[in-house]
Image (cartoon, rainbow, N blue to C red):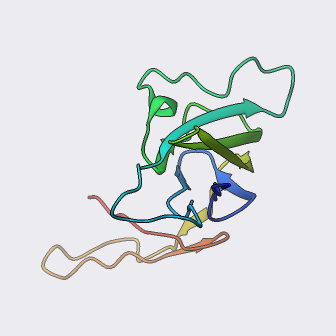
Amino acid sequence: NKIKAVLVGGDRKVSIGTNLTLDGSSSHDPDANDELDSPFIYSWACEPKDKAQIYCFSDDQGLLASSQPILTIPTAGFKPGKYKFTLRVDKEPGPRTDTDSVTIALTEAEVPNVWILPGPDRYDPSQRLKIQSRAKGKGKIDYVWAI
């Protein structure tokens, strides 16, 4: 009978510079007998939706060759645009095959606006230094200070 490839999360937007995780671990065989069944064989593909692009990214690390159900790809090497990622699952006997695809829209990361608020003109070195800032942007903003 038919097996079912499932990519969790569906179509979505991801900022370039973050990791993209594709999760096919919910793929299943409705007729499975866990004690006797052969495991799934997973394979991955990426196709740019913009036909002017020849490939998705430079896969020097062989990430798309992974046979694991979860694939994590750093997006730093991508150009902004839409990409179709396809998971193919195969299983013996047969082989039986199914695919599932998602479209990922990779966008430039939004850089938040950050301001350091003015303080006194002079600081007393025997006192604690206090620096304040404000930031405006979408989502969570993390601060890292170095002096």
Locate residue 58, reporting x and y percent. 55, 21
Q: Position of residue 82 (x, y in %)?
A: 79, 41
74 displayed left or right of 145: right
Q: Identify the image quadrant of the C terminus.
A: bottom left
- Along the line of sight, the residue nearer the viewer: 66 or 104: 66
Q: Is 129 on the left-hand or right-hand side of 116?
A: left
What residue occupies the far right of the structure in this picture?
51
Quadrant in which the N terminus is drawn: bottom right
Q: Quadrant of residue 4?
A: bottom right
* 29 lies left or right of 60: right
At horizontal 49% and vertical 64% (from top left) the residue drawn is 32
Q: Residue drawn at (67%, 70%), measured in percent from left and top? A: 138
Which residue ends up furthest to the bottom in the rendered image?
127
Image position, residue 118 (x, y; %) = 50, 73
Depicted 83 relative to depicted 121: above or below: above
Residue 42 vertical position relative to residue 46 in the rendered view, above or below: below
Depth check, front residue: 56 or 17: 56
Determine the residue positioned at 41% across, 50% down: 39
Q: How many marks?
A: 0
Which quarter of the figure has residue 135? bottom right
Q: Nearer the viewer, residue 108 or 33?
A: 33
Q: Residue at x 38, y 65 (%)?
A: 34
Q: Residue furthest left?
A: 126
Q: Position of residue 79 (x, y in %)?
A: 69, 32
